[in-house]
């Protein structure tokens, strides 16, 4: 009991489980710290804004899955505005302006892109300009993807699902002498080597080389202008992949760390300390106080925790702070109250308590300075063991859709994965990465708990 | 200076009362020591607790007079007592110094604690008084920065004595102050206590079961048996010429070093305070028991001793 903090820390650190725990926790803390520096909070703020994540592929696996697959899976290629070469000339007699944008990119991956898209920004005064987008493949064939009028100042052309593009791709497929597949995927066909099975992603092969994208615009105003961006979305992205809303999961996972730690730690500290305080108070003041505290604790302990939380979060929109306070309020009294009470009953019979009474220390002072410090090691152990429980709780609530919708937490990501059918579609990274982090965090605190338990609970220190 | 008369402290337990302290009287002069001796469970510590008002929750009766310099402490309110008497006039060294110190307080803070809780001194002054107190009990000043578990048993005991002196009390109750110490340390502590008594003019109420130890310090002796003081008088006479059969037996039971005399013993066991024998409580174990002993013995003055025994009663 009367061991110093330093000694305790050393003993925890030298035990195997304590060391493991500290290593994991250091990792998670580094992750939390990295979150502050490398992923600015604005990024997290935009977690739910679809615009922000436009440039990322949908449902992309982590980049390092290329290593697992043993082939070079495609990254996203963005041909940006400034990458396009722009030519324009005006024929004044007929009042027509021709603008040509030419961009090119190297495609050397072993897989097909996941999507194709173009963004065309046009400024025009009179009639809608006409636009023709053409892809020039390394084998010399050209395919027109779109030939249409520009109807918006900014048009997003999702070429992979565009019916015109699909029809034109099918024509190209036929002219190239391929069998007609059941479904046409422009992003596959356009990047496939010519052959009989050009349209079948499982049988064709990738045509590697330099692709050029050419956009011809015909417009009537001499001051009209056009800029474009061409996106060849890949199959892999970043360290943690993306989800169905193109969000970089790394951002969510990295920011989930401080949120999980903050939630777990503050819930565990608040509930453990308050429960212990109430238990001590109950034993120390005794009588009616004791009776009432203990009976209320009994009621608290049989309170159906989850149903109440679910009810409340169905009725009110819950954010993470409300959730935290709900959890704390629902665990103000509990197991630690009982433990602390029985420990206080033991401590308060000791001589130094009687001595303190005799020299006139107030009852409150005795409780706070004489009794509570004796419970600290147990409170700490309890906090450490309660953290994983609260991390799991937050994850479970998020999974049930009761979490804070605005903040990405690990549980929320798993919840999204569940909703997005990640398990059925084999999107392993979407489920496994947040799960692994939750388990790792919980394990770290559990290990730390065991190590601490060994130190503060001398009967376990035999071996 | 301190005059205790008819002090009673009964505890309520399931099914009855325990008469732990039953109408005791004694007197303490300035600079003097009264030793309260007796077997375990005879009410010695309860007497101390009754004087310092350290009462458990199950007190049944708590009456009598405790006059301190003419003022009846029993008539004071609890907080008045705590403010004016506890530690400032009467302090206490508890049985088992090992457990009398808060394990999470540094010794220095612990020694100063009585001043701090009454906020009767500024922090700086408390620190000064604390180092003075440590000096008085011959503890190195470095001990102030240590935790109790880092001190030896003797040092802890000195710290506890220092704590009892911090508010300049006039009376110190020493409840078995050396019970858990080895003989050498015990002798050291006893010498320190003697010096302190002389230097500070302290009065002691010295509670012990050890008659030899009591003889070191005591000016007068109160022999307690089953909640009553059966013999009370000057210490010298008590050792050479005990009057009460219990005192005689108690002295006989002390082994001697140089004679062949076998130490005597008292047959039977101390009575159940829950249900004490009628009349003289020593009567079931007394070799001189008579019929009249079934009645409450009167106090008799014999050679300056007050004896509670029918043998000495004037009939």
Image: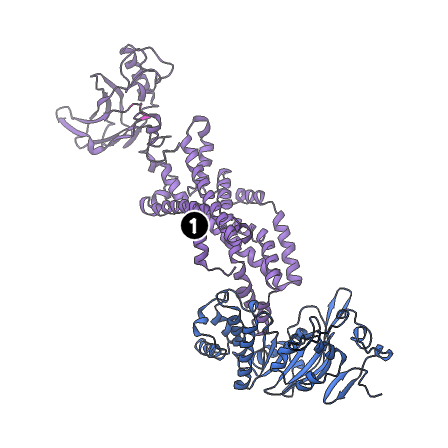
Instruction: Mark 1: give few (<14), some (14-19) or many (20+) Cα within 10 Å.
Output: few
Which chain does the purple colour mark? A
The answer to whether B95 appears left or right of A321 in the picture is: right
Q: Pointer 1: what residue?
A: A14
B270 magenta-colored: no
Residue A365 in the image, given as x and y percentages of width and height: 54, 68
Quadrant in the picture for residue B34: bottom right
Task: Tell me if residue A114 comes above or below residue B209 in the rendering.
Answer: above
Q: Which residues are magenta?
A: A110-118
Residue A405 in the image, given as x and y percentages of width and height: 45, 41
Quadrant in the picture for residue A304: top right
Q: Residue at x 67, y 63 (%)?
A: A287
Please state the chain letter of the residue tagged with numbered disc 1 in the rendered image: A
The answer to whether B239 appears left or right of A329 in the picture is: right
Question: Who is closer to the viewer here, A306 or A50?
Answer: A306
Question: Who is closer to the viewer here, B186 or A70?
Answer: B186
């Amino acid at each position: 009991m009367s061991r110093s903090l330093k000694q305790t820390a050393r003993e925890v650190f030298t035990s195997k489980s304590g060391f493991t725990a500290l290593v994991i926790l250091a990792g998670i803390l580094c992750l939390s710290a990295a979150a502050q520096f490398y992923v600015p909070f604005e990024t997290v703020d935009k977690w739910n804004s679809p615009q922000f994540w436009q440039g990322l592929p949908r449902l992309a696996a982590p980049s390092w899955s290329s290593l697992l697959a043993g082939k070079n899976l495609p990254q996203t290629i963005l041909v940006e505005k400034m990458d396009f070469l722009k030519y324009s000339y005006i024929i004044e007699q007929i009042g027509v302006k021709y603008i040509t944008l030419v961009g090119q990119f190297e495609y050397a991956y072993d897989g097909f892109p996941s999507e194709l898209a173009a963004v065309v920004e046009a400024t025009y005064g009179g009639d809608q300009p006409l636009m023709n987008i053409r892809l020039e493949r390394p084998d010399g064939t050209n395919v027109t993807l779109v030939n249409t009028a520009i109807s918006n100042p900014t048009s997003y052309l999702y070429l992979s699902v565009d019916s015109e593009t699909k029809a034109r791709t099918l024509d190209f497929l036929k002219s190239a002498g391929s069998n007609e597949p059941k479904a046409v995927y422009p992003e596959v066909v356009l990047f496939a080597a010519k052959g009989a099975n050009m349209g079948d992603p499982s049988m064709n092969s990738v045509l590697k080389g330099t692709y050029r994208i050419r956009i011809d615009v015909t417009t009537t105003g001499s001051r009209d202008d056009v800029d474009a961006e061409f996106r060849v979305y890949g199959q892999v992205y970043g360290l943690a992949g993306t989800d169905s809303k193109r969000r970089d999961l790394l951002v969510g996972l990295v920011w989930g760390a401080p949120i999980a730690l903050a939630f777990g730690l503050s819930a565990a500290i608040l509930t453990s300390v308050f429960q212990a305080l109430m238990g001590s108070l109950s034993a120390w003041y005794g009588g009616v106080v004791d009776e009432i505290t203990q009976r209320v604790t009994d009621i608290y302990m049989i309170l159906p925790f989850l149903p109440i939380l679910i009810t409340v979060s169905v009725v009110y929109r819950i954010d993470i702070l409300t959730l935290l306070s709900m959890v704390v309020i629902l665990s103000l009294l509990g197991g630690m109250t009982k433990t602390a009470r029985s420990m206080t009953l033991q401590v308060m019979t000791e001589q130094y308590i009687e001595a303190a009474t005799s020299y006139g220390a107030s009852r409150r002072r005795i409780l706070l300075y004489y009794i509570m410090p004796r419970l600290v090691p147990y409170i700490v152990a309890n906090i450490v063991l309660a953290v994983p429980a609260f991390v799991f709780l937050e994850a479970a609530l998020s999974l049930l859709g009761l979490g804070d919708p605005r903040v990405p937490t690990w549980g929320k990501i798993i919840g999204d994965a569940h909703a997005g059918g990640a398990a059925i579609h084999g999107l392993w990274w979407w489920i496994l990465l947040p799960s692994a982090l939750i388990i790792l965090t919980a394990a770290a605190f559990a290990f730390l708990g065991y190590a601490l338990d060994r130190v503060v609970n001398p009967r376990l220190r035999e071996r | 200076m301190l005059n205790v008369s008819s002090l009673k402290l009964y505890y309520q337990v399931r099914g009855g009362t325990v008469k732990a302290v039953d109408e005791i009287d004694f007197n303490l002069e300035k600079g003097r020591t009264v030793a309260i001796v007796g077997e375990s469970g005879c009410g010695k510590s309860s007497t101390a607790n009754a004087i310092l008002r350290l009462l458990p929750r199950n007190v049944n009766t708590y009456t009598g007079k405790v006059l301190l310099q003419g003022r009846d402490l029993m008539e004071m309110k609890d907080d008045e007592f705590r403010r004016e008497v506890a530690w400032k006039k009467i302090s206490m060294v508890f049985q088992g110094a090992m457990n009398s110190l808060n394990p999470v307080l540094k010794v220095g803070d612990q020694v100063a604690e009585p001043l701090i809780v009454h906020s009767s001194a500024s922090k700086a002054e408390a620190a000064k008084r604390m180092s003075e107190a440590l000096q008085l009990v011959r503890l190195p000043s470095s001990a102030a920065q240590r935790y109790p578990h880092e001190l030896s048993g003797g040092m802890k005991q000195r710290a506890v004595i220092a704590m009892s002196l911090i508010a300049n009390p006039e009376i110190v109750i020493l409840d078995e102050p050396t019970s858990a110490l080895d003989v050498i340390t015990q002798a050291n502590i006893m010498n320190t206590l003697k010096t302190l008594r002389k230097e500070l003019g302290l009065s002691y109420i010295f509670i012990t079961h050890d008659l030899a130890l009591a003889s070191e310090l005591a000016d007068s002796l109160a022999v307690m048996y089953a909640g009553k003081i059966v013999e009370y008088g000057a210490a010298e006479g008590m050792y050479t010429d005990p009057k009460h059969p219990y005192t005689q037996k108690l002295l006989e039971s002390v082994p001697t070093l140089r004679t062949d005399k076998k130490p005597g013993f008292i047959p039977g066991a101390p009575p159940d305070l829950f249900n004490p024998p009628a009349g003289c409580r020593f009567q079931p174990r007394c070799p001189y028991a008579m019929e009249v002993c079934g009645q409450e013995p009167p106090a008799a003055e014999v050679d300056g001793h007050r004896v509670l025994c029918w043998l000495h009663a004037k009939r």
